[in-house]
Amino acid sequence: MTEVIEASRPRLGRWIAAGTALLATLATVAVGIGWWAVNDSDQRFPAIESESLDHQQAALVEVLRREHERPGAGPKYAEGVTEPWCADFVSWTMREAGRPLANPNSGSWRIPGVYTLQEYYQSLGRFTRPDVGYRPRTGDVVLYGPGSPMGQHTNIVLRADGDEITTIGGNELGRVRVQTIKPAEMVDLVGYGRF
């Protein structure tokens, strides 16, 4: 009988570890859903002073304004593929603005994954972590890790004001959406792909 009890202890430990991991995952999902629900108010497209933008930034802002006013469904931005489409939205809008990205794995303009988008910016030397005092600017791509309230996600900076940035992203509650955040208070904001 003692042998049976001894043999079941490792199994019990694995069950406890699995249960703890499941509870942690459910808590993260609940916090994320709560954050999205509180921040569900899609803002108007902000006024952006065009004199402060270069011609590529201005072209991107016009594409983003158009997509905010008349958004497509996810497959529009993903070459017809049905998938989580936040990185597809970033890729598509950059291409439409005349500044296409290049997928490091395929060479395509479309980078469908947030982590691959980060790798792309790192390979170009245009990735900056948020803790280095960098002030985001119009056109920068914000990259969030899986621990953020939005989960692993990406969107684009429209403007920076003081300690806040206004962003636009695809697949935010299933749509194209504008929101304002305080990067210093955002959990798991991984960094910025500089425009």
Image (cartoon, rainbow, N blue to C red):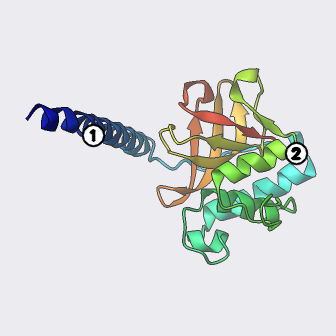
The correct choice, above or below, for 109 with respect to 195 in the image is: below
In the rendered view of the protein, which quadrant contains the C terminus?
top right
Front-most of residues 82 and 77: 82
Q: Which mark is residue 19?
A: 1
Q: Which mark is residue 144?
A: none
Name which residue lies at 14% across and 38% down: 4
Q: Position of residue 168 (x, y in %)?
A: 63, 50
Considering every residue shown, the one lying at the far right of the view is 55
Residue 195 can be seen in this image: no
The correct choice, above or below, for 169 with respect to 179 in the image is: below
Left or right of 195? Residue 114 is: left
Q: Which residue is mark 2?
A: 124
Q: Position of residue 74 (x, y in %)?
A: 57, 69
Name which residue lies at 50% across and 37% down: 147
Considering every residue shown, the one lying at the far left of the view is 1
Determine the image quadrant of residue 11: top left
Task: Name the amino acid, label 2.
Answer: Leu
The correct choice, above or below, for 85 with respect to 51 in the image is: below
